Image: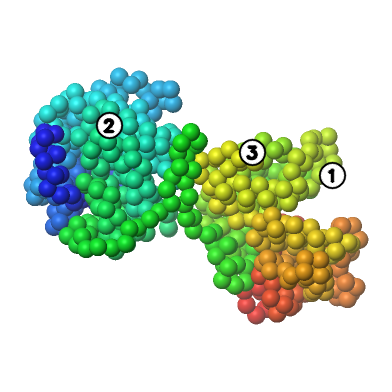
Amino acid sequence: MDAAAFRSLLAEGPLLADGGMGTSLIARGVPVDACMEELNVRASARVAEIHASFVGAGARLVLTNTFGANRYRLERHGLADRFAEFCAAGVALARDAGAPIVAGSMGPLGVRLQPYGRVHPEDAFAAYREQAAALADAGVDLLVVETQSDLRELEQGVRAARDAAPNVALIASATFTRDDRTLLGSPPEEVAQTVVSLGVDALGVNCGEGPAQVLRIVRAMRRTAGASSAPIVARPNAGGPAEVGGRFVYPATPEYFGEIAQALLDDDVAVVGGCCGTGPAHTMAIGAALRDRAPHARIEFPEADHGDRILDVVTVTPPTKLEAKLATGHFVVTVEMEPPRSFNAARLVAAAETLRDAGADAIDVADSPMAKMRMSAWAACRLIHEQAEIETVLHFPTRGRNLLRLQGDLLGAHALGIRNLFVCVGDPVTIGEYPHGSNNVDVTATGLLSMITHAFNAGVDRSGTSIGAPTSFFVGAAVAPSAPDLEREARLLARKAEAGARFVLTQPFYSIDPLLALRETYEKVADEPLTVPLVAGVLPLMTSRHAEFLHNEVPGIEIPEASRDRMRSAGDDDEQAWREGAAMAAELIAALREEGVAGVYVMPQFGRYDRAAEVVEAARGPATM
């Protein structure tokens, strides 16, 4: 099919394309790391079945199972010299399944071009050219250079396809990350301008974060490509992928897909289909939207503002689990953990799993507590989140970080998927192992709170320069209910709340009196009740000696005489003393619940996470200790 025939076909009305081949194969039991293109020969019936299911759902344009049928990707499986065989078989399978229009899929090479990689542009051109020639020789109706995240590589793919098959219609399609840019930083307008200049027959977007993002990008591309009347192709994923139980799932339902398809058609999209996570049901929903063009309200999403600045995109980010639980009144239980003094985090992860199984909602990861050398707290957060599968709260001190480092670390934490932050000043290095180290504090805890909530979460840094897209941090602050000057502490807490603190962690206390006093003082100095969710610190007493040490030597901790008497009465037996300390912790948690605190923050002592798990279980139900 040449360009004129393709344009003539599109003039008759939008084309319905198929859905995700790779995820459909995986759903049928194919290992995620298998060579999908080899299945065209080794398990052709399985591939043919998927093609037929999409054709049966109404798809007119079907992509071949040749996404990775290029030398570079096949080389990983020791099959580099079989690209032409897989391409020919892929075209035949789609044709035999009854596809009215067979489109030869050409995905990225799976390598990086210079200067970000070691592959010369001319070598990339050669790889694309031989794949395009093989598909053209097999009789495809058109070629699709798709899912491209590097504009320079996309150019080589388009030029190679044109050179190998000048009389075959050609589509070029890019994919974009959450900030509405390609992985290597190109906004939709730049992609559209470049691709149109290469003379493709249609351009578009596929894969990505889901239908809403694709609609946003289509509108941005339309502004650039509109003057050329270049047809637009839209093939979104079924939402942004999420890992559940070691597998990626895609949340967008067929019904939702159909609604966004209506919006895409309103923007004159010429080809509409699906990508990863979409099956025949999604194809049918798009087909229904194609048939039903009744009047309806235009679907609007926040638009990107490019201009001369880095792309600013307003996205709706789901709340963290901790944020959602606090918002719904769920009594949260978090536990503090210290990163290891080694790069080996196996014990840390094992303890986090124990606490998770006991019922903890999140793990608080301290950053260099007592100014002692530890693994980076954000690395520990990432390992716990990935391996123990429990959400974390990163303690983020201002001490020891200059303003430049603070902002860079915020971006790094967000890139690692860390969203819950606890902002504090941090322990002075003078009390730790390196007393002559840097102890600078460029920003107060209140100033950092404001910078995160009013700048980074709004998409700009401290100077007002765009950071590309807003962060979505859920930020908490500290308070000391037993502070000597409680009015000063309450005023400081009011400033933290104004700066954007969304929850408050307290220092430990051992009766509800400090809590009541804090609330009363706060209402007096702020002229309003304390409404920020308060998560009360609970530090279980281990022995009488432990109680006396905390009371006499740790600033901000006061243990009532009655509590210390109970620990003395427990005697010198460590197990019996622990039972008494654990019972007092359970009693305090019950009293805190009655006073309406949002949750408790358990601080294990001496690395006894097994005992912390007992306290967590007590917080989750009737005290059994």
Label 3, label 1: how far apart the Cα atoms are: 33 Å
Within 10 Å of the Cα at label 3, are there few (<14), some (14-19), or many (20+) other Cα atoms? Answer: few
- Taking depth in this image into account, of 461 and 127 the one nearest to the observer is 461
Specify the amino acid type for callout 3.
Answer: Ser
The secondary element bearing badge 1 is classed as: helix
Q: Quadrant of residue 141?
A: top left
Label 1, label 2: how far apart the Cα atoms are: 63 Å
- Taking depth in this image into account, of 115 and 546 the one nearest to the observer is 115
Q: Which residue is mark 2?
A: 196
Residue 263, visible in the rendered structure:
yes
The secondary element bearing badge 2 is classed as: helix
List x then y, in percent, for residue 19: 24, 51
3 or 1: tag closer to the N-terminus: 1
The secondary element bearing badge 3 is classed as: loop
Residue 81, above or below 397:
above
Q: Is residue 242 left or right of residue 596?
A: left
- Taking depth in this image into account, of 260 and 407 the one nearest to the observer is 260
Within 10 Å of the Cα at label 1, are there few (<14), some (14-19), or many (20+) other Cα atoms? Answer: few
Q: Quadrant of residue 593?
A: bottom right
List x then y, in percent, for residue 449: 68, 51
Residue 416, visible in the rendered structure:
no
Q: Are marks 3 and 1 in contact (CB under 8 Å)?
A: no
Label 3, label 2: how far apart the Cα atoms are: 36 Å
List x then y, in percent, for residue 312: 49, 43
